[in-house]
Image (tube, rainbow, N blue to C red):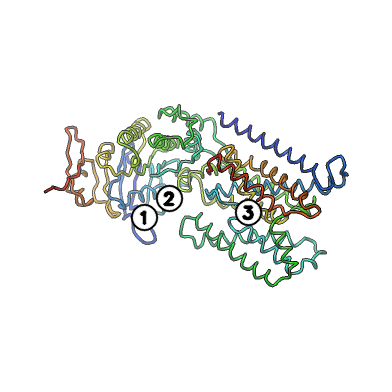
Amino acid sequence: MTTYRRGWVWLGAAIVLLAAAVVLGVMIGPAGTLSSANWNIIWNVRMPRVALAALVGAMLSLAGASYQGVFRNPLVDPYLLGAAGGAGLGATIVIAFGRATTSDWFVDPLPLAAFVGAIAAVTITYLAGAAFGSMSTSTSLVLAGVAVASLTSAIQAFVLQRSSDGVIRTVYNWLLGSLVKASWHDVRLVLPYVVVSGAVLLAHRRHLDVLRVGDDEALTLGLNVRRIRIVVVAAATIGTAAVVSVSGLIAFVGIVVPHAVRMVCGGSYRRVLPISIAVGAAFLILADIPGRMLQNPAETPLGVVTAFCGAPFFMVLLRTRRATV
Amino acid sequence: MSELAFANLSVSYDGRVAVHPLTLNVASGGWLCLIGPNGAGKSSVLRSMCGLVAHGGSVTVAGIDTAAMSTRRRSRALAFVPQVPVLPADMTVYEYVLLGRSPFISYFGVASAKDRATATEVLGELDLADFSQRRLETLSGGERQRIVLARAIAQGSPVLLLDEPTSALDIGHQQQALELVDRMRRERGLTVVSAMHDLTLAGLYADRLALLHEGGLVAQGSPAEVLRAEILSEFYGVNVRVHYEDDGTAIVIPNRRARA
């Protein structure tokens, strides 16, 4: 019983952390704190940025934790099966082949291409892994993911190598991840995917707990392992693709947040998933703050900040607690 | 009445035959022990029964073909204790035993009061009540074996499959674990199929032995019928003698090569 109660305490603490992060995120910015900044900046610049950071952080953390659960591998992140490579390739192609001429299009092709690229890459990974995999399915999937990621980066390099310096710089900035252009439009675009994907993943937290004893034993405990893996990977991938399409490839969140949560609150996915949502959202909101302030008026890419802050924090955690999945 | 029946059960891996068509019946409440040298196909038989490897022929539990069962239905009919169970380090004993109730929890459901009561009850029956909040990483080898067994018992299946349940234990804990299986078998009317290497222990606890050799069934029957020096030396390639106690217990002793 005590374990359950402790789970609620940790979830409460994570929500308080998130609330504090939201307040800080709204208050701090190049235009000054709440009192001196005008409402227009708060509402149209900072709030959508905070909201988007929360959605992206929550989604990447939740997807990372879910991927780690179905693959029973602590070093896995939501980009494992090629989502990052596919999104990067999609974005690269759009930027390289004249994004400027598409400003009057009905939909912005950049997020669309990133989204489609991510989904396509993971689909190819899954089909290849299932078709050619003679080993246990999860191992062959991971290897197929490595192959697809190499393929996408090869094509990407080929495209970039023939592009101008300006294009390369734009692509590079996109790859590092940024929330500079966050708008309420982006939030509305991404929110449905995050809500649906999040609901599906949360609904599978008990299955992820059963999977902790391995595929074979989970099967003998009545779990349809293959089907659950497909559902979880699909939900995590769609959510990841949606947030990546507007934020670029923000590194490290999907690995570091679930781990930090696990080390503090234990490995049960009944706790890890919901708490990762809150902590991931808070982490990305906070990580976005130095990004806007450090090189003002220029922006430090968010992916740089997450890795720079996350890595040492992670090392401290590794030192003080044992990592388990 | 036979609770469990194999009819022409066969297993092959990439065309290599691991188990030749095997036909066997196990009476309800009986204990069949599969013996045989490494690679004889004991684990393949057990793993094919619970759907972990594909098999030919059929396995029926209480007259129902397991091939016709869903994964969940099969896990209610057969509980499996693998040779090397995966024990997530920071899970508590209670949470682990509760996993045994998974086959009874609906897809989006959570453990019901009945599931939790069953887990608590099984922990009590196996004298593990004091352990319920212990983390798995803190348990000794003998304790681990007991909680894995507790998880399988909590599954409530009429058939219990054990893949070398005592291979990692010292003699005291081997006895303790097998006594526990035997008690559960009698109290709950379980049908047990185990694979074991220790022939003396196999003969002591199982009521029937089946000797597998290179995937084929070469001898079966009561321990006294199977544990014979000439049979063992033929199929294990060993030089042993079998000593019989007054109560019929067979003790298998390797002969030491004569020294000059």
Numbered circle sitting on residue B11: 1
* Residue situated in front as seen by the camera: B24 or A36: A36
Q: Residue at x 54, y 48 (%)?
A: A74
Q: As shown in the figure, which amino acid type bears the numbered disc 3?
A: Thr
Numbered label attached to residue B72: none
Q: Outermost residue toward the bottom?
A: A162
Mark 2, secondary structure of its residue:
loop
- Secondary structure under tag 3 reads helix
Label for residue A237? Answer: 3
Distance CA(mark 3)–CA(mark 1):
37 Å
Image mark 2: chain = B
Residue at point 16%, 32% (across, down): B246
Instruction: State left or right for residue A102 relative to residue B98.
Output: right
Disc 2 versus disc 3: nearer the observer: 3
Task: Say few, some or many: other residues with alpha carbon within 10 Å of mark 2 (under 14 / 14 to 19 / 20 or more).
Answer: some
Question: Which chain does the numbered disc 1 sit on?
Answer: B
Left or right of B40, for residue B49: right
Comparing A303 with A88, the one in front is A303
On whether disc 3 and disc 1 are found on a single subunit, the reply is no
Label 2 belongs to which residue? Answer: B52
Left or right, B231 with respect to B154, comes to: left
- Across and down, in percent, residue A169 comes to 73, 64
- Quarter assignment of residue A113: bottom right
Say if labels 2 and 1 share a chain. yes
